[in-house]
Amino acid sequence: MYSSPTSVYSAIIEIIKKAGLFPKPTISHTSGSKSKVQIGGKEVLNFTSNNYLGMSDNEKVKDAVVAALKKYGISSGSTRVLGGSHDIHEELEKTLAAFIGADDAIVFSTGYMANIGALPTIINPINIPGMSGRDPKRDEITVFSDKSNHGSIHDAIRLAKCEKVVYKHNDMVELEKALKNCKTERKLIITQGVFTTDGSILPLPRIIELKKRYSAMLWLDDADAIGVLGENGGGTPEYFDQNIKDVDFYMGTMTKAFGVFGGFVAGNHDLIDYIRVASKTSILSAPLPPILSAAVNESIKLVKQSSEDRKKIILLAKQFKHGIADLGFEVLGGNAPVMLVMLGDDNKSIEVEKELAIAGIMASVVRYPAVPWGESRVRFNFTSQHTEGDVNKVIEFFKTIKE
Ligand SMILES: Cc1ncc(COP(=O)(O)O)c(C=O)c1O
């Protein structure tokens, strides 16, 4: 029995702290999201950043922010539909759509907002007066969601209160079986490009084949692939040489490879216009400040020219994988900028995170709720700012804990 309505929270946090699993910000630093950061006056190698291409501290991107700051100030002032929309927001939406090869795009203040704002309205189309001939039977939908999807996707599906099938991670046999047995008229497959909990990439060609065979729609969250995968940074559709038009809703974040902040959804004109009128996190929430829109606009130009950096990131990730796996550790990850070392249990992962920090290496433990209890793992993100020497330093560390 709890002593007060709030004691449940204290009870939960006490258990988490006793188990040593409280994610303390042991890693607050003072020097931005670079590959080397300052912590307590000491230089530390940083493998936690999603600033994959170094755009967060690129001089041209910073200059674009300063110029926009002088012109626009800081806040958008209001929501997009109530006068807070600026020319620079529209420019960004056009630039993003062109970058992906889609007709149109809508920008949200974060990727999380894009998922929880747009997805529920796609799943349950809004009711508007004067729409004749609507048959509730035809609106019925089943959502097919990869088990390892990001929390924002799980939340979006929960908000939509719909029929759902959660299929085993990247298991196309299970997905096809569920699509075949599905009785609802409409179907929506929701999946990610890169899964940062195990470093895997989705089998996009197969998913597109299934989506076409079973007349389903596809929502692709390419947060960790956009800018990094594909010759020009076009994410998993470009990586797999697929037509972007086969992805009905292409969602991404601007916080990772673009090094800034914000989220977006790209697709055909009608679908994006529909999200513009239906998504509450766009209509009722403040948009990206103009300075950040300016930063992404500049960043996209540079990301397009970063082919060599994209190759370097994957080479560093592979160097890491071979080096650590050769020592006998289990390493998850493939052709993506993320690798994870499995150490057996939650406490061991947290212990190694601390030892890494003492050795001047910052890596993060992926823990519950991102992965099930007991399956924590240590994640390393690779960026174009890292060097082979940086990776060798981590391999040397793992040698010492193996001995
Ligand atoms: C797959 C995926 N989707 C969505 C998000 C949320 O993006 P944002 O950080 O822009 O809110 C993330 C963030 O880590 C993510 O990894």
Image (spheres, rainbow, N blue to C red):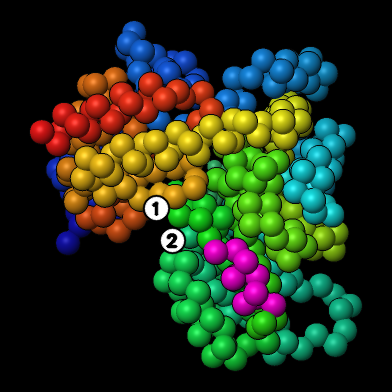
Coordinates of residue 238 in the picture (x, y in percent) = 68, 52
> For the magenta stretch, what is the residue range?
203-212
Q: Main secondary structure of the magenta part?
A: helix
Residue 375 visible, this orientation: yes
Q: Are marks 2 and 1 in contact (CB under 8 Å)?
A: yes
Residue at screen point 76% across, 88% down = 135
Q: Answer above or below: position of 147 versus 384.
A: below
The residue tagged 2 is 148
Coordinates of residue 166 in the picture (x, y in percent) = 46, 73
Magenta region includes residue 206: yes
**157 or 286: which is nearer to us?**
157
The residue tagged 1 is 198
Q: Is disc 2 placed on a helix, strand or loop?
A: loop
Q: Answer above or below: position of 220 versus 366.
A: below
Residue type highlighted by circle 1: Asp
Q: Quadrant of the N terminus?
A: bottom left
